Image (spheres, helix red, strand yellow):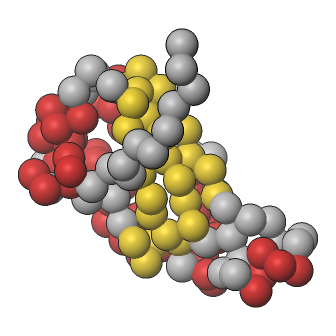
Amino acid sequence: MRVALHTKVRAGRIADYEAAHREVPGELTDAIRAAGATSWTIWRWGSPLLERSRELGGGTDLFHVLECEDYARLLAELEKLPVNVAWQARMAELLDVVHDYSGEGADAGLPVVWELPS
């Protein structure tokens, strides 16, 4: 299944957020794969080089797309895993809108509006 998510980095913490993601612990990426994810990409909206982007939030909106077998199972397996708990605590310092790993988080994905027909 494919899941799209929205989170939001704090305006003054963009560089810290991006630096953290250059150093995601291997133990965490292994756990994400073991929980059923086959891919996970995060985009940050806007560019600090574009004036319009700064007016609209400076590129603080984050959009995630992940492919996994079962998103609810992925969240359940990661929610209390020590390496993920530590990572989420680190992210909580950097984010205004966090990724919800609770049981309700499985329903927090962005709704599909349209897909290119096959």
Quadrant for the C terminus in the image: top right
Can you give x and y, in whole percent of width and height, for residue 7 in the image?
A: 45, 63
* Quadrant position of residue 30: top left
State whether residue 35 appears in this view: yes
Is residue 21 found left or right of 112 in the rendered image? right
Can you give x and y, in whole percent of width and height, for residue 117 in the image?
A: 53, 20
- Residue at the image point whose x is 24% and y is 35% from the top: 71
Can you give x and y, in whole percent of width and height, for residue 29 in the image?
A: 41, 32
* Quadrant position of residue 32: top left
Give the answer, above or below, for where 26 lies relative to 18: above
Quadrant for the N terminus in the image: top left
Q: Nearer the viewer, residue 75 or 28?
A: 75
- Residue at the image point whose x is 51% and y is 31% from the top: 115
Q: Nearer the viewer, residue 17 or 7?
A: 7
Is residue 54 found left or right of 41 in the rendered image? right
Q: Nearer the viewer, residue 52 or 85?
A: 52
- Residue at the image point whose x is 57% and y is 26% from the top: 116
Give the answer, above or below, for where 56 lies relative to 91: below
Can you give x and y, in whole percent of width and height, for residue 16 in the image?
A: 61, 68
